[in-house]
Image (cartoon, helix red, strand yellow):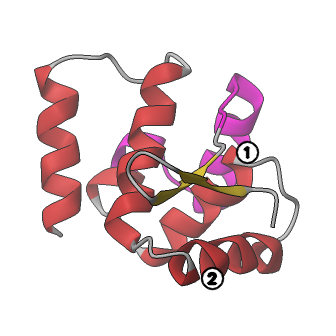
Amino acid sequence: MADVKTNEQAKKPQLNLHFTANRMRLIEEELNNSIFRALEEISFTTVLVLVKHGLGLTTDEEAGKVMDDFFKKGGNLQDIIMQLVKALQDDGFFPKNSQTEALMAQLTQA
């Protein structure tokens, strides 16, 4: 699948995630929760919805296939969560500071 690339240096699969204000609105509507609360109470469904919208996909099934491909290429759920938070930072939705680093650490311990 074109949505999963392998980072040759780290040999880890990479998702090409991008978030916009409209995508964030759609995520919050679908989860019936703010993005901040959704990340505090992270679930597989939350990750799937974030991947779906971060890749600009339209169905959960498409996102599930991308995630399956990611796992087959050696990635894991924690890798996806880290990439989601990084993409949210890069796109301006989270600050690049120690609080976000603490959030990432908390999310990957769950």
* Disc 2 element: helix
Q: Quadrant of residue 69?
A: bottom right
Give percent across and percent down for residue 73.
55, 75
Give the left or right position of residue 63, taking residue 43 as reference. right
Q: Main secondary structure of the magenta part?
A: helix
> Residue sitting at 32 percent across and 65 percent down?
78
Give percent across and percent down for residue 27.
65, 49
Give the mark nearer the N terminus: 1 vs 2.
1
Q: Which residue is mark 1?
A: 26
Looking at the rendered structure, the number of numbered marks drawn on it comes to 2
Amino acid type assigned to the residue bearing label 2 in the image? Asp
> Residue sitting at 73 percent across and 37 percent down?
23
Give the left or right position of residue 108, taking residue 47 as reference. left
Q: Which residue is mark 2?
A: 68
Give percent across and percent down for residue 95.
32, 16
* Disc 1 element: helix
Q: Which mark is residue 6?
A: none
- Residue 60 position (above or below residue 58): below
Q: Are marks 1 and 2 in contact (CB under 8 Å)?
A: no
Circle 2 residues within 10 Å: few <14, some 14–19, many ≥20: few
Amino acid type assigned to the residue bearing label 1 in the image? Leu
Give the left or right position of residue 30, taking residue 81 as reference. right
> Residue sitting at 75 percent across and 56 percent down?
3
Q: Which residues are magenta?
A: 18-37
- Residue 50 position (above or below residue 101): below
